[in-house]
Image (cartoon, coloured by chain):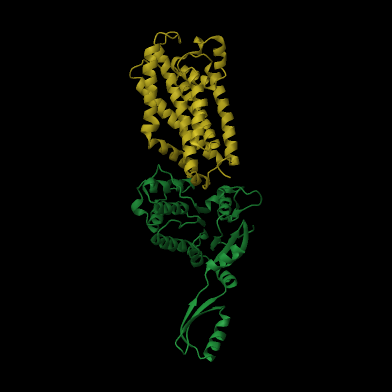
Chain colours: A green, B yellow
Amino acid sequence: MSLAVEPGEFFGLLGPNGAGKTTLINVIAGLARPDAGSASVMGADVATDYRRARRMLGVVPQELVFDPFFTVRETLRIQSGYFGVRGNDAWIDEVMRHLDLTAKADANMRSLSGGMKRRVLVAQALVHKPPVIVLDEPTAGVDVELRQGLWEFVRRLNRDGHTIVLTTHYLEEAEMNCSRIAVLKAGRVVALDSTRNLLAAFSGSRIAARVVARDGSQHLLQIEGYAQLERELARLRSRGVEIADLEIERPDLEDVFLRLTSE
Amino acid sequence: MSFWTLFTKELLRFVKVSVQTVAAPVLTSLLYLVIFGQVLEGRLQVFDGVRYSSFLVPGLVMMSVLQNAFANSSSSLIQSKITGNIVFILLAPISYAEFFWAYVAAAVARGLAVGAGVLACSAGFVELRLEAPLWALAFAVLGGALLGALGLLAGIVSEKIDQIAAFQNFVILPLTMLSGVFYSIRSLPGFWRELSHANPFFYMIDGFRYGFFAASDIAPGLSLAIVAGAFAAVAWVCLSLLKSGYKLRW
């Protein structure tokens, strides 16, 4: 596998369970050692220059893990200290506000719901303002309200110059946020392109036209590809078919994903 | 700063549950003192001019230091591994040496806290003298560091709490009990006296006791060198395992 994420990108890493997404993230984060090859973060090798590499990386792990001895604020202060950041309360407060954690700042981690614990994991990854943020299934088990707030915050970080690497099973989230996507399958990159190109190249366009004929009957017609649209409409008109309504169904990433991973 | 944060986190971890991690072991040691002190007073030959209960206190203090230092690092690491929150340390730019020293220093701190508690409570009803306090402190710190490192080693290689418990019950506890906490090895028959010299815990107890009575079975300098050598060996194994990521990174 050879893969480069450009600075400032919002990059999606997709693939079925067992494709190697989390393994790849673990290698980048130094949690796993590759059998061969190397990985680097902003030019710092994750094995030989691990301190610099880890300082530039903020990882939201997939597992819902926490330290039951501490409150939310203590957890975030400790995490800041691990990364050598002192007097970080102003940023911690801001991160907690964006993630709607302020009211729980002094609550013990044990007392939080699963969604709240997930928010703390995100906050922990951000305490040292890393230039590269890796989100491994950040919205699993999280309610709709937090998802919206989280994505708004992450998009803001991306606009501010942070590189975002996202893995998710919610393909609409990847489609909505990622400018470029890699699809993994069995440890290999099976597609790597901009989200727009992937959608165009793999899914095609599905156009659904609801047709009303002279005799009053209605038909649902599905056409592959925008290029066919004008030709098919002309053909229908020449047959005297009056089009009462035209509904266009846009291609989505789920089609791309299914095609790539089922081949 | 990473070291200080990890060290402080480990300190807070046991301070937050100090009834369980400090008060309970102090009470256990005091029960040993009350029971063994009452039953064996005047029946066991120890140092000349030293009452048995006075002889027993330094042994119990050092036993508390050693057992709690081991418990601190081993339980903290295995809990972090089992719950998965070890990932927060592994993701951070913390070197393996900082990792090692932070866990060992926190283990020493808990050992000293419990030891000081046992000493302070014992002083209320047993006559104590501290002839060479710096020797006592040196053995307490180095002994705590050795057991803290052993606890870390057990935490690294173990995958379940049962394995830590086995290490504690079948290695640490017998070596502590047979180290001369409750008796002087002078009172043992020849074979058992010689065998006691193979127990590294004996040198820690004997050297620590020297700090109280300026009397010991082995010269304190030699004992301290043996304890330091044992610590260096265990530290080297720990650092090598941490560097390789054995059972922590995969």
- Any part of residue B128 in sight: no
| A86 vs A25, nearest the viewer | A25
- In this rendering, would A25 be left or right of A96? right
Q: Which residue in the rendered view is the most extreme toward the right? A: A36
Residue in the picture at 60% in, 48% down: A49
Q: Which x, y percent locates residue A214?
A: 47, 90
Which quadrant holds the C terminus of chain A?
bottom right
**Residue B133, image quadrant:** top left
Q: Which x, y percent locates residue A54?
A: 54, 50
Q: Which x, y percent locates residue B48?
A: 45, 8
- In this rendering, would B73 be left or right of A107? right
| B180 vs B131, nearest the viewer | B180
| A16 vs A41, nearest the viewer | A16
Which quadrant holds the N terminus of chain A?
bottom right
- In this rendering, would B92 be left or right of B110? right
- Determine whether A165 is above or below B176 in the image: below
- Determine whether B44 is above or below B109 in the image: above
Residue in the picture at 41% in, 38% down: B13
Residue in the picture at 53% in, 90% down: A239
Number of marks in picture: 0
| A166 vs A169, nearest the viewer | A169
- Any part of residue A76 in sight: yes
**Residue A40, image quadrant:** bottom right
Q: Which x, y percent locates residue B162?
A: 49, 33
- Determine whether A121 is above or below B224 in the image: below
Residue in the picture at 62% in, 62% down: A190
